[in-house]
Image: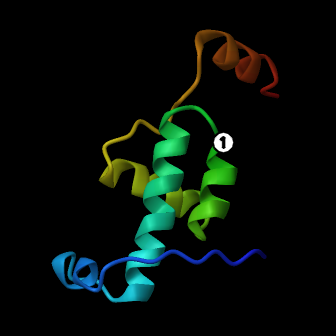
Amino acid sequence: MKNLSIQLPETVFSALRRSPDEFVQEMRIAAAVKWYELGEISQNKAAEIAGISRSEFINVLSRYKVDFMQYTAQELAEEMANVD
């Protein structure tokens, strides 16, 4: 695993009423949700980035008001063709 370091003003944590650890977790989730919403990553990859299970990630999507189905018509047809 790779560690990244960012500097944030101390006031950020109190403004959002989050501890630094909670803030970092929420940043991971928010980034994963946005990248998923933009179609840049899959649900599995987003869940991995967020550090949660795929089912937890799907629940988080509703909190952010993001549709869990991010398929184009062609992708959906391909998925349906592969269903046994």
- Left or right placement of residue 44 versus residue 50 in this view: right
Point out the image quarter for the C terminus.
Answer: top right
The residue beneath circle 1 is 42
- Left or right placement of residue 3 versus residue 21 in this view: right
- The residue at 58%/78% (across/down) is 5
- The residue at 41%/57% (across/down) is 60
In this view, which residue lies farthest toward the left? 15
Give the amino acid at mark 1. Answer: Ser
Q: Where is residue 70 in the image (x, y as percent from the top left)?
A: 53, 29
**Camera-side residue of 31 and 69:** 31
Indicate whether 82 appears above or below 65: above
Q: Position of residue 34 (x, y in %)?
A: 46, 45
Q: How many labels does the image show?
A: 1
Q: Position of residue 82 (x, y in %)?
A: 82, 24
Label 1: how many Cα within 10 Å (few below 14, some 14–19, many 20+): some
Q: Which colour scheme is used?
A: rainbow
State which quadrant residue 15 falls in: bottom left
State which quadrant residue 52 falls in: bottom right
Q: Position of residue 49 (x, y in %)?
A: 63, 62
- Left or right placement of residue 62 versus residue 50 in this view: left
Q: What element carries label 1?
A: loop
Indicate whether 41 appears above or below 51: above
Point out the image quarter for the N terminus.
Answer: bottom right
- The residue at 47%/49% (across/down) is 33
**Camera-side residue of 28 and 54:** 28
- The residue at 33%/50% (across/down) is 64
Indicate whether 30 appears above or below 15: above
